[in-house]
Amino acid sequence: MAFSAKIEGNELVIRLPLNEKPERSASGKTLVVASTRGNKETDCVVQGKKVIIGLNAYIPVK
């Protein structure tokens, strides 16, 4: 799943597509609605180093 990240002023802006259907997490406790699927390097640079993003967006299982 492709995502984008950019720096706007003093904010890191991340755009990450939602899953078409939430997927159960490995633990089964949540439903993942969007994920980078691990840590990913971006083109964003802070203090001369590329920013790495690892992001999971989820909802609880009822």
Image (cartoon, helix red, strand yellow):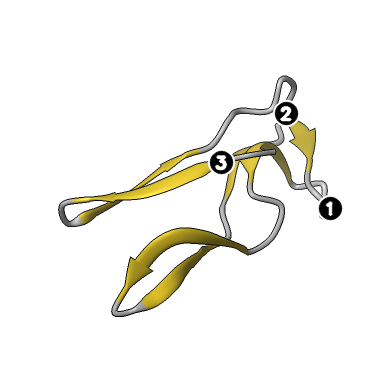
Q: Quadrant of residue 49?
A: bottom left
- Left/right placement of residue 37 relative to residue 7 reads right
- Left/right placement of residue 45 relative to residue 4 reads left
Q: Nearer the viewer, residue 50 or 11?
A: 50
Q: Nearer the viewer, mark 2 or mark 3?
A: 3
Q: Amino acid at mark 1?
A: Ala
Task: Single out the residue that lies furthest toward the top.
Answer: 20
Task: Report how many numbered discs are placed on residues in the image.
Answer: 3
Mark sitting earlier along the chain (2/3): 3
Q: Nearer the viewer, mark 1 or mark 3?
A: 3
Q: Position of residue 20 (x, y in %)?
A: 71, 20
Element type at marker 1? loop
Q: In the image, what residue occupies the spot 64% across and 49% down?
A: 36
Q: Nearer the viewer, residue 26 or 40?
A: 40
Name the residue tied to disc 1: 26
- Left/right placement of residue 1 relative to residue 47 reads right
Classify 10 Å Cα crowding around label 1: few (below 14), some (14-19), many (20 and above).
Answer: few
Residue 22, label in figure: 2
The reply to whether the C-beta atoms of the residues labelled 2 and 1 are less than 8 Å apart is no
Q: Position of residue 17 (x, y in %)?
A: 58, 30
Element type at marker 2? loop
Q: In the image, what residue occupies the spot 72% across and 28% down?
A: 22
Compute the Cα span from label 2 to label 3. Answer: 17 Å
Name the residue tied to disc 3: 3
Compute the Cα span from label 1 to label 3. Answer: 22 Å
Q: Nearer the viewer, residue 57 or 12?
A: 12
Q: In the image, what residue occupies the spot 75% across and 47% down?
A: 29
Element type at marker 3? loop
Q: Nearer the viewer, residue 40 or 30?
A: 40
